[in-house]
Amino acid sequence: MSSHSKARGPGRRWLNRRVVPLLVTGFAATGAAGAIVADAAPPAFPDNVVVFPDRDFVTIEGYQNHIGETALVEVTRGSEVIGSAKGVVEEGDVAFEVNHPGGYCWGAGTDLNVTPDIRPGDKVNISFNGIDAGDTIVQNAYVTGDATVSGNTVTVRGFAGTGVNQAQMEQRIINPDLVDTEIGKRDIRAIPGPLTPAPKGGYSSALTFEGNQFTATYVFTDPANALIASKAELGERAMAWQNEDADGNRQGLTIAEYGEAGGPGMGGCPAGPGDAGAPQPGSANVVRSASDKSKMSVTWKATDQVPGAAPVTGFSVEAIDQNATTLGEKTLVGKRTDATATHVDLSGLDAAEGYDVEVRAIAGDKMSAPYTVQVPTPTDLGDTTAPTLSFSPAATGAITTASTITLTAEAGSDVYYTLDGSPVIAGDLPSGTAKRYTGPIAISGKVELNAVAFDRAGNFKTVTGVFQAPADGVAAPPVVSTITGSAGQANVTLSWAAPETGVTGYGIQAYVMNAAGTAKVASGTLKTTTAKTITINSLNPGTEYWFTVKAQNSSGYGPASMEQGPFVPTKVTDAVTIGTAKWKSGDFRVTGSGSAVGAFLEVHAGSPTGTLLARGQVEPPVAPATVGTYDIRVRNAAAPAANPGKIYVVSENGGQAGPFTVTAG
C-alpha cells in the first residue's frame, strides 16, 4: 500500500501510516458465511525521521513514549553538525516538526543559528538527554525536471543515486485540481514496475529505471486529466526510504520536492548558509602605547564559521580619527590580514587624537559589520598610572601548585598572557603570541605564565610566575568494580562504590548493539555525576543497554569499568479504565479510557490472561476531554457466542482494568 499524506491541522501530517484491520480470535477477514472483521484501531504509529531536503524541513513522527520530553535533532555532514534544533514531543503521530509552519525553527534551543542546506548523504539524528533514539540518511533520489505531457501521457524523469534501493521508491505528482476529476484524489502515484491501473481508475502508471535514471509514466483515460496533472506547480516528488516494516510503514523516508525553495520555512527562522551574507562580527580589543601614542595594538576573536557558508578569507582592521576635518572627512590607518590572524599593530596615528577602531571579517566579496571595540579617547591619553594585576593563587618565588589560575586586574583593563615563558609584551604593546585573558586558565603539567594588564591609556603592569598542576603528582583513580543496576520504566539505575578517596566525580557511558548485531557502540554522550548512583532516563523500552563507569580525580578519569548489562528498560505503565461493556448476539462492544495514546489493548474473558475476545487501541482525546479513549467493537461471527460475563482490558504498556461485568443489550 502506498504512503498517504493528508492534512491534520496546522503543521501536522500523516506521512506513511498504513491502516491494517486487526483480526480477532483467529477469524479471517471474510469467511464462508460472509463474516467480516470488526472495526479496529490501526497499528501503533512507528518512530520515524522524515526529511524534505528541498525545503530543509524535518518531521519527527511517533516517539510517544517521550511525550513532554525535549529532543535534540541534529543534521550532520561528515563529522560536522550543520544544523540543530530542540523540540518537545507532543501527543499524536507527528511528535514535532522543524522548519515548517507550526513547528520549530532550526537553531531553537541551540547556539547554531542557521537553517541547514540539507543534501543527499546528510544524516538527521534525534536524541534524548544524549541517548540516540533514531536517525536517517538523506536519500539521493530526486526529480530532474517538470512533468511533460503528450496526449494522454504524462512523463516525469529523475535520478536515483548510489545507496538508493530502487525497489523502495515511489514517484508522485500532487495537484489538488485532480480531486474534482475521475481521479478523485489530489495526487497520482507510480511505483516500480510496468504500467498498472490505479486502484480507483482513471490512469495507469509505471516506474522504470535505466542505470541511475528513473522514468515515471502516467497514461490517463482522459487527456484533459493528463493536462491537469502536468500543470502541477512544485508537485513532482521523488520518495525513497531505507526500510519498510511488516505493516508497510516506510522508515527513513526522504521526500524530494522538485522546485521547492530551501532556507527558512517561516518568518523569524535563521537564514540558510547561502543567504548568510557577510560573516558575523566577533569582538575586538585595543591597547594604545603609553610611550608612543602613534602606535596601538588590536586583538580580536572571530565568531564560529556558519556551516556551509563562504569561509572567512581575512580581516580588515582600521583606526578612524574621531575628529572630522572641515570637509567632514576622517583620516584612517589600517591593515588587511589573512584568515588565521588575530592580532595586528598599527602605527602612524596622530598622538593627539582619539580613534575608533573597526575590525571586520571578510568572506569573498562580503565584509561583516564592525566588531565590538574599545576606543581610546583623548581624555584617556593623560592617564599615567599603571593598572593593578595579580594572580590567584598568588605566585611565589618557587613553583606554585594549582589546577587553574585566575588573573585579577583593575576594572576596564585588558589582560594578556603566555604560558610557555615567551614574552607577553613587545615594547609597550602585547606581543604577537599573547592571548587575551577571558577567564580562569586551566593548566596541566608545569607552565611559566607571563601576564600583562593594560588600562585605556596604554599604561601597563606585568607579572610572572611558575605553576605546577597537582595532577602531575596524583595517580588517576583505579577502575570502578562494585557496580549494581536495575532496569525500570524507560530508565536504568546504576550504583557503585568509590574506588578510593579523592574521587571528585564519575563518568557513565551507555552502549547498544550496532545495526548488524555484531558489536556494541556508544549511545549518546558521557553522563557525569558527583554521586555514586545515577538514573538514566528516556531510554528505549525493549532495547538492551550496557554501561561503563569511570572515576575522576585531579588527574582526570581512570580506566572504564567492565561493561555492565544487558539492562532492558520496560515500557512506562499506563492507566486503563472500562466505561461500558455490552453484549448481544453478534455484537460485543467495550469502551473506556487510557492514559497512553496509541497503546494497543486486549479484551480478555474471566482473567487478564483469559480467552482473547477483541483488540483495539487508545485514540487521542477529543476536546474538551484530556484523556485518550477507546471503543472496541466486534460483530457477527467475530463476536463472542455468549455473554462472557467478567472481562479485563489489558494494555501493552502494563495497564489493566477489571474485572468488569458485561451487560446484555
Image (cartoon, grey):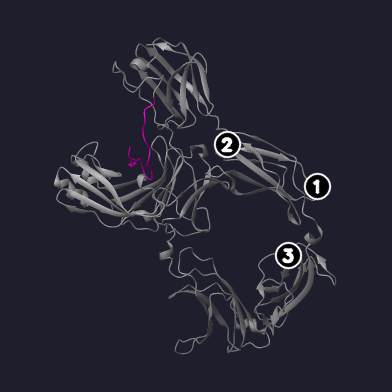
Q: Which residue is mark 3?
A: 443
Q: Position of residue 448 (x, y in %)?
A: 76, 72
Q: Is residue 317 magenta?
A: no
Q: Which residue is mark 2?
A: 490
The magenta segment: 1-22
**In the image, what residue type sits under mark 1?**
Glu
Give the CA distance from mark 2 to mark 3: 40 Å
Q: Position of residue 405 (x, y in %)?
A: 74, 65
521 sits left or right of 366 in the view = right
Frontmost residue, 39 versus 122: 122
- In this rendering, the label closer to the viewer, 3 or 1: 1
Give the CA distance from mark 1 to mark 2: 32 Å
Q: Quadrant of the N terminus?
A: top left
Which disc is residue 408 wearing?
Answer: none
**In the image, what residue type sits under mark 3?**
Ile
Considering the numbered disc 2 on the image, is that residue within a helix, a strand or a loop?
A: loop
